[in-house]
Structures are given as C-alpha cells and as structure tokens.
Amino acid sequence: MLIRQLLCLAVLLAATLPSLARTVSHDLALSEMTVHLGGKARQAMAINGTIPGPTLRFTEGDDAVLRVRNDLKEDTSIHWHGLLVPNDQDGVPHVNMAPIKPGETREYRFRLRHGGTFWYHSHSVLQEQLGIYGSIVITPKGGERVKADRDVVVVLSDWTNERPHDVLGQLRAGRDWQQIKKGTTQSIVGAIQHGAWLDMVKRSMTRMRPMDLADVGYDAFLANGRPAAEVPALPGQTVRLRLINASAATYYHIDYAGGGVKIIAADGTDVQPVESGRFLIAIAETYDLLVRVPRQGGAWELRATAQDGTGRSSLFIGQGERHAAPDVPKPNVYKGHSMSGMGGMKSQDDMAGMDHSKMDMGQGDMAAPMPEMDHSSMTGMKPAASTMKMDDMAGMSSGGMSHSMDDPERPGSPYEKLRALRSSEISDSRPLREYTFHLQGDMIRYVWTLDGKTFTEADMINVRRGEKVRFTFINDTMMHHPMHLHGHFFRLVTGAGALSPWKHTVDVPPMTTRTIEFAADEPGDWMMHCHVLYHAEVGMMRVVHYEDAPESSYMAEHTMSSWPLLGGVHDPKFFFGQGTLLSQMTEGTVSLQNNRNGLMAHWQSRIGNGSQTQYELGIDYDRFITSNLSTFASYEWSTGVNGNRGMFGTRYLLPFLIQSQASVDTDGDFRFTVGKAFPITTRLSLFGRAQYDTKALWEMTAGMEYVIHKNLSLVGQYHNQYGWGGGVGFRF
C-alpha cells in the first residue's frame, strides 16, 4: 500500500515538474544611436543602448521570455543563434516568422533545452553589421563541468564607417575600393616586388582575379565593443573565456600571451579539454577557453588578429604591466594560390573552369546532445557503393586537408583536436538522406551561390522527420565560408570518429570539403547559409524543409518575381554608376541590378558647335548566365553613321581578364569590343578599349586613372575620334 502511494506521488510530481520551470524574462529595445567606434561619428543600431547588446543569462530548463521592441525606422528581427527553439521562434523573417515592424513589440517564448555559450543577432538585411548582436549564456543543470575562478564573455566583432549597403554596392559594382582602403590591392609593381609576376600572369590567363583574404576594409575590430578591453584577475587564477565571433565578415587568429589555451567547449557544446596554441575562429562560432594568469602577475593579452592582417582587438587578462601576444605574420596575397598558405585566400572569381555540377548528400541530430551515427559512405559516393567508413575517410572528406595547406604560423580551425565527451554517432536505423553542395561565387559581380543558384532560384532542401541527414560542402572558391544550420546541432565528421564534435557552424576552407550529419528531429523550415553576412545577403542561403511538416506561410515571399528586376525579398537590388568628365568628352554608365538581371544606361558625347556635337546613348537589358557570360538586348540613339538601332549580343570574360562584347544590330551589322585595365600600382591603372563596328569601323580608347577616393579619381584619356583630354572620374 505504501509503495503504491509513493508511486502515485512520484507520478504526480513528474506531471507537475514542467509547470515548475523557472521563467526568466529579458526586454530588448532596438534603436539607432551615434557611435565613434571607427574614429568618426556614425549612425549605428544598438540593443538597450549598447553595442554589443546585453548578455542574456539563463539556466538549462528555464522558460525564456524575450520581448523585442523595434524602435528603428525599418523592419527587424532577432535570431537565437545556436539555440534549439520551436520553428516559429527562430526569428528569420519571411521564412518562419513575420518581420517586427517599427513600433511593434514581439514576444519570443521557449524552453531552454541545453546549456552553453551562444549569441543572438538580427536576421534582417545588414543590421547585424550595424550593431544588433549580443551574447547568451546558459548554465547547465548541475553547474559547469569545468570550474574557473572567473567567467567572462568576449564578443568579437568588426565595424565599418561606411553604410553596409554602400559597401555591398561597391562589391556588386566590381570596384576595388575596399582593397585599396585596407592596402591589399594587387598591382603589377607589387607582383614584381614579391617575385610573383608569373603567378599573376598565370592567374589572369585562367580568368582568376587578384586574391584577398576578406571582402571588406574595416575601420575597427572590437572586443566587447572596444578595440581593447580588460578583465581583472589575480596571478595564478583561471579564467573561462566565452569567445563569440559576432563579426559580419572577419575570421580571427586567436593568441594568448600567457601561453596556450585550453578549449573546453565549441559552439556551446562541451568537448574533452584540449590544449591549443594559435587557432582560427570562424564567423558565428563560439569557443569556451580556459586560460591561466601567470603567477608573476601582469595583464596578459588575448589577441584576435583579423585573418587578412589589417587589424586586431585585444582583451587584457590580469592587472599591472601589459604583456603582448605574439604577432601573426601578415599574409602574402600574391602567393595565395600556393598550397602552403592557402588558409583563407580567395580569388575574386568563381574558380572558372571548375566543376559546378550538383550532387546529392546530408547532416546531423541533437535534441539531447549526443546520438548515434552512420559509417556507411564517403563524400560524393552512394552508400551501397562504398566499402570504406565515413570516419575512416575524415581527413579527405571533412577538411583534414586544410591543415596540410595552412601556414604553420597562420593555422586553421582546431577541428581535428576536438573530441566529444561521448559518442556522437547517429543510429544506422534511421533512413539516410544525403546532399552535396558546391559553394561557389562570382566575385566580378559579387554573387555567391550553392550549386550555382542563389537563394531565390533554388528549391528547398527536403528532409523528413526521423531521418539521418548528411550534408557535404565542397568549397569551389578561394575564400572561407562559415556554414550555419538553424535549429539543429550537427555532427562534424572528423578523424575523431565516434567522438567527432557537435557544432552548429562549420568553417569550410578554400578548395576543401567538410561533411556534417544531423538527426532530423526538429520539424519546420530552417535556414542554412554562409555566415559571411554579405555572402548570405546576395544568395548563399537555402531553406531546409521538413516534408512532413506544414510549409511556413511566409515561404512564398522568398520566391522570384515574374518581373526580372523585382526579385524576392532575398534578392537585393543595387543602383550604381560611374563616368568621366573630360576636357574633350564625357562618358559613363548607370546600372540597376539584382542577382541575375541588369538594366543599364550608357552614354558618350562631345559638345561642340553645330555638326561637331556628337553623342551616343543606349539602354541595355542584361541577363547574367554565368560569372563569365551574359546576354543582352539594347537600343541606341546616336549621331553620324550609326543612327538609331536595336542590338542583340553577348558579353564574355576572356582569358587574361579581357572583357569582350559581340553583337548584331537590326540592320545586320556587327560590333565587336575588347577592353582591359592594368593595375600598375595600388591606385594607378592603365586601360584600353578597342571596338570594330561594320558601320562606324574602328573606335579606340586608351588612358590612365588614379583613384583618390571611393567616389573620385583623376583621368587622362585619348580617344581616336575626340582626341586627348583630362578630367575626373566619378562613382556612385
């Protein structure tokens, strides 16, 4: 009888436990403010008046209530990066929720299913770059497994004094200002000085533009909103650093002046503690580090050095005399294509000539971090055809190659060192679904894709609840891509085999492959995207859709419009132009573009007396097919023998980066044009253009340009019809 009563009491207690969960609330107000982060007064976006926003602290099992008030002048959103939340709480506008309108307050409510270090940020346009990000700390039930004397959150970020949309517009227009700004522009003189002249010629022969490590020239790199921050600590004390890379577009090399660090968690999930020296942290990753203040005392620098070597931020741990961390050697961008030192170099093109074919593959599970897994296939092969285990091939399929390509002084991600606390294998009893994705990009027009398709062009990635899903990422570009999957933890397949670590974001280095796996147990529509903010904005995103779950009512908004230049909400439009005002003539172009379509007006004119006045005005519609090829239709109005005519043709990028154009007009006449610019120094270039028209015969232009500012340059030019002249070039 007593036993029966005790059992009944236990059942009643178990039934009431969920209702006894603690509710923890936070109010977040998003607003504009003026900041001086990069040495100039600029408008930013802040959370509760600070950048970064406040640290949100919880305990595993808490019910989180987060009220977000939008005091901005535009729509916004908040995504809870790395948290396992219900699909309608994920915070991605037009995918699984509506945007938060100006003046509106949105309440997010969910139970915290796990502990760890995470972060939150806007998922609307480029707001993250402007300051809408902050940290989340969830203490596990029973407390932290690894104890420390201090517990400190470190949020790394980057800041530009330019409007993010202007930065993206410059990249879309194919301009080099961001490289000029940070001193990484490649030139003929520079190539000769670095003994890389032949390398430059070979790359241009294969239509590969000059390389760089990052797209954006930043004005500041920040740790907790400042270039340098301090953490008081006593000699001999241990400090747990919750390191979060909340940058929009910057990878960092991490160094500690006090010796090595101990990695104790990755992406919010505990790992077997492992010693590490310098390592690379990708955008959107988190690492928990254990560091010790040396017993001799002082303040010891934890330094985050931007991967392109253009700046750094610091955290000084301790008190007293400062001790600097070692310098990271600056990369040699002229040698970026060599196998040693490839750790992040990118070419400003899509690796023309590489295989862009699509294959099929998949991902991983974690409602409670550590399930089971399949060993049945290797990257790019059907399971039935494989006799080798996935884990056995980890060095080939999951990016183990990246370490062999890294400069020892510029190492990559520490993935091969990481070990899960217990087996991460996902059960073989689950049906296996596999996808392979080629990460690709067109740096000439700055369009980034998965399998050659932008977000609005691609179908959703279908999975079904209960499956084991494997995704294989093949990076066809020369730039790192941090791939993030919402709503899931995934198993990163490494040489650790059954102890491969759990993550939610994975760095895919240039020309390498990473494989991840997850258990499909979180129904809904979830984003999967590159976390370089500018890459995602122009197309490197997909939606993972559970076939057995209702499709989100918001998903219809992501599709392409029937009007080419309208696109969807994730197909941004750019308006830009350039021209020259010379003593003998003026010419220029004005363009409106989205990812696949362009509308351009171009002109060339000379004002004179009577018949000396000449002009040519045209309007073109372009359809961009590949990074090297587009077709166009145009109509031109002009004086002289050309007259008015319609034209149809193609534009094609030839070897040696020669721009070409061939067209036929409505009278059956042909036109062929070639042109090229030669970068002599970082700011000075020579250019030339030759055109043959069966009506007007030859037209030739040659000159030089010296860039003064992103919007202004000095130009000297010869035109065979208009003669010599000089003046200014302008861009907008």
Image (tube, rainbow, N blue to C red):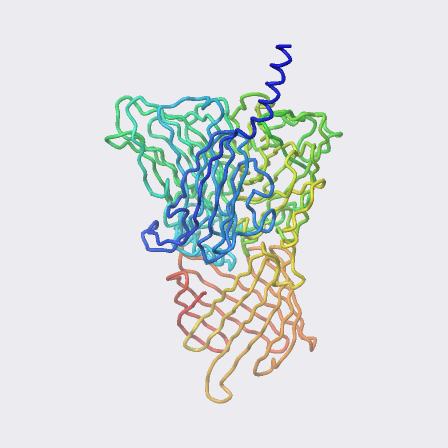
Could you tell me residue 474's position as x and y percent? 61, 40
Q: Nearer the viewer, residue 50 or 415?
A: 50
Q: Residue at x 60, y 82 (%)?
A: 641
Q: Residue pushed farthest left?
A: 320
- The residue at the point 57 percent across, 65 percent down is 674
Whole-percent x, y for residue 709 in the image: 38, 61
Image-quadrant location for residue 149 = top left
Looking at this view, name the residue that lies furthest to the bottom: 610
Q: Percent from the top left, x then y, of residue 520? A: 66, 34
From what the image shows, is residue 28 above or below residue 612? above
Task: Quarter of the image for the N terminus: give it.
Answer: top right
- Tell how many labels: 0
Q: Please, which residue is most extreme toward the front here?
A: 1
Q: Nearer the viewer, residue 267 or 307?
A: 267
Q: Position of residue 397 (x, y in %)?
A: 62, 32
Res. 682 in view = yes
Q: Report the residue at 76% width, 29% height from top.
A: 384
Which residue in the rendered view is the most extreme toward the right?
384
Q: Is residue 415 visible?
A: no
Which of 76/20 is in front? 20
